[in-house]
Amino acid sequence: MELSSDRAVARLEMSQIQNEDGEPFNENSDRDYESLPPHVSVTTHMTAGAVAGILEHTVMYPVDSVKTRMQSLQPDPNAQYKSVYEALKRIIKTEGIFRPLRGLNITMMGAGPAHALYFACYERVKHSLSHIIQRGGNSHIANGVAGSVATVLHDAVMNPAEVVKQRMQMYNSPYRGLWDCVRTVTHAEGVGAFYRSYSTQLTMNIPFQAVHFITYELMQEQLNPHRHYNPSSHIVSGAAAGAVSAAVTTPLDVCKTLLNTQENVALSSVNISGHLSGMANAFRTVYRLGGLAAFFKGIQARVIYQMPSTAIAWSVYEFFKYFLTKQKLEQEAASGQL
């Protein structure tokens, strides 16, 4: 399923855009679609990224709530679940239909700006490195490095939102709402609590995004070699990238959840007083509490959440990138005819 603009408009678009070497793009070039974005404003990438990020986090949010609970190392007997479906069913039945959505507001507040920076940075770094490494062609090294650099910016914005979100998702969460959670955590643990898991988040997300972007670009080479706007290829590539990257980084996600939630029951059971901090301490604590198996708690929910979420993010991002680019080119063509 491939979408394209009117042929006359398409020819006009391609004839009016030149690459950085001053040469016009070939209408039949493999780079036609993917080469357009670097020549439009950063605002285009940020707008597309923000919309994609918000949709990515909201559509599958109930499954993310289940994942957080399933990663609990010492769960309450009433919060032990065998599957994602059973967990959602019990949560809705015993805690109310809106309970799986608790913490969604802070997630949306963080996801918009975080993903705007994320995609804009990714596109710029990828384009710059690809031009150096492959003379403008696709480079897996450039894709991986670009994804890693973009992650540093993304997580700097998203980490505080993750801390609040996961504390509100836990069973018997003591917080009345978003601002009550922010005030309570700040008063009891200090502002640093919102970045306690930042190093672990980066340690998880840098390999996650490197695997994610490399897998996505590899899939695109197979399914969409000419790099046109092709929704089905973006969905399939995004889902595959999300599944692979989520599965291989689950152990780090379990550690991140422990650092974010600071489970009192779990920490007390291994005689840890105060607040747990640091990736190494988190790894040791997870192993002491559940052995190697504990590092893969919630893997099913994580993959189920990540596959459609990543597919949604890429398909929405690629659509907005295509739409906004095409709209701008048509406006330029119209103004040029006046």
Image (cartoon, rainbow, N blue to C red):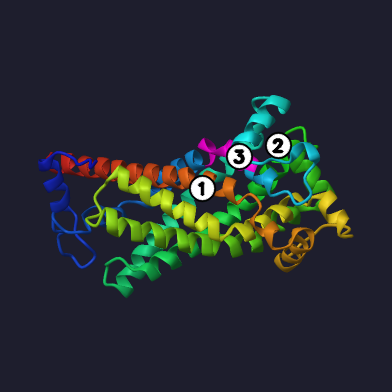
Question: Amino acid under label 2?
Answer: Leu
Based on the picture, tell me whether residue 65 belongs to the magenta stretch. Answer: yes
**Quarter occupied by residue 172:** top right
> Which circle, 3 or 2, is nearer the viewer?
3
Q: Is residue 327 above or below residue 119?
A: above
> Which circle, 1 or 2, is nearer the viewer?
1
Residue occupying the point 50% across, 40% down? 54
Q: Nearer the viewer, residue 275 or 46?
A: 275
- What is the x, y in percent for residue 201? 62, 59
Q: Are marks 3 and 2 in contact (CB under 8 Å)?
A: no
- What is the x, y in percent for residue 71? 69, 49
Disc 3/disc 1 C-alpha distance (Å): 13 Å
Based on the picture, tell me whether residue 224 belongs to the magenta stretch. Answer: no
Question: Amino acid under label 1?
Answer: Gln
Q: Are marks 1 and 2 in contact (CB under 8 Å)?
A: no
- Which stretch did the figure color magenta? 57-66
Q: Which residue is mark 2?
A: 178
Mark number for residue 84?
Answer: 3
Sequence order check: which comes first, mark 3 or mark 2?
3
- What is the x, y in percent for residue 146? 43, 64
Residue occupying the point 53% across, 55% down? 246
Q: Which residue is mark 1?
A: 306
Question: Amino acid under label 3?
Answer: Val
Disc 3/disc 2 C-alpha distance (Å): 25 Å
- What is the x, y in percent for residue 74? 79, 49
